Image (cartoon, rainbow, N blue to C red):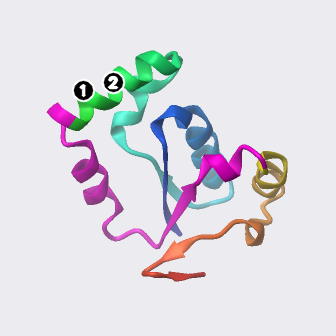
Amino acid sequence: MKIGVVGSMQYTELMLEARDKLKQLGHDAFVTRLATAFVGRTDEEKEVIKIQQKNNQDAIREFWRMMQGADAILVMNLSWFSRNWRMSAGALRTGDLGQLRFLRHGGML
């Protein structure tokens, strides 16, 4: 299954971790190509990068184009996710993706 992983770029490292685990489970998972600029940066640096990418690289459209043709999108709602990280991380570790919700063509899988 081709799965796009989306969320706030403040949590790029967690999105990359989720992408990597999905790949280990046999999925064709991806994040935006613009994510690499955020890895290892402070929150303040990430804010500056987000504004630069939004204004100069059309970051939203770049990822929108990547999502076309995806089977599902994993939305990492990290305000919820941070409170429930252990459950969600456990689901990724065990491969029990039924605990996670995937948005597919306007509906839930």
- The disc label shown at residue 49, or none: 2
Relative image position of residue 47 (x, y in whole percent): 40, 25
Residue contact at pointers 1 and 2, CB within 8 angstroms: yes
Q: Which residue is more in the foreground, 32 or 79?
A: 79
Magenta region, residue range:
55-83
Q: Is residue 59 magenta?
A: yes
Q: Is residue 51 left or right of residue 11?
A: left
Relative placement, left or right, of 87 versus 13 is right
Q: Residues within 10 Å of mark 1 (few under 14, many from 20)?
A: few
What residue is at 34 percent from the left and 71 percent from the top? 69
Question: Which residue is depicted at the point 57% across and 48% down?
Answer: 19
From the image, which quarter does the C terminus lie in?
Answer: bottom right
> Is 34 rendered above or below residue 99?
above
Image location of residue 77, percent across then percent down: 59, 53
Residue type at tag 1:
Gln
At x 52%, y 16%, the residue is: 42
Q: Residue at x 56, y 39 (%)?
A: 16
Q: SS at mark 1?
A: helix
Q: Position of residue 54 (x, y in %)?
A: 24, 37
Give the numbered dot on residue 52: 1
Q: Looking at this rendering, what residue extends furthest in the left direction?
A: 56
Which amino acid type is marked by label 2? Ile
Q: Circle 2 — which element?
A: helix
**From the viewer's perspective, is residue 55 above or below residue 8?**
above
Asked whether 98 falls inside the magenta stretch, the response is: no
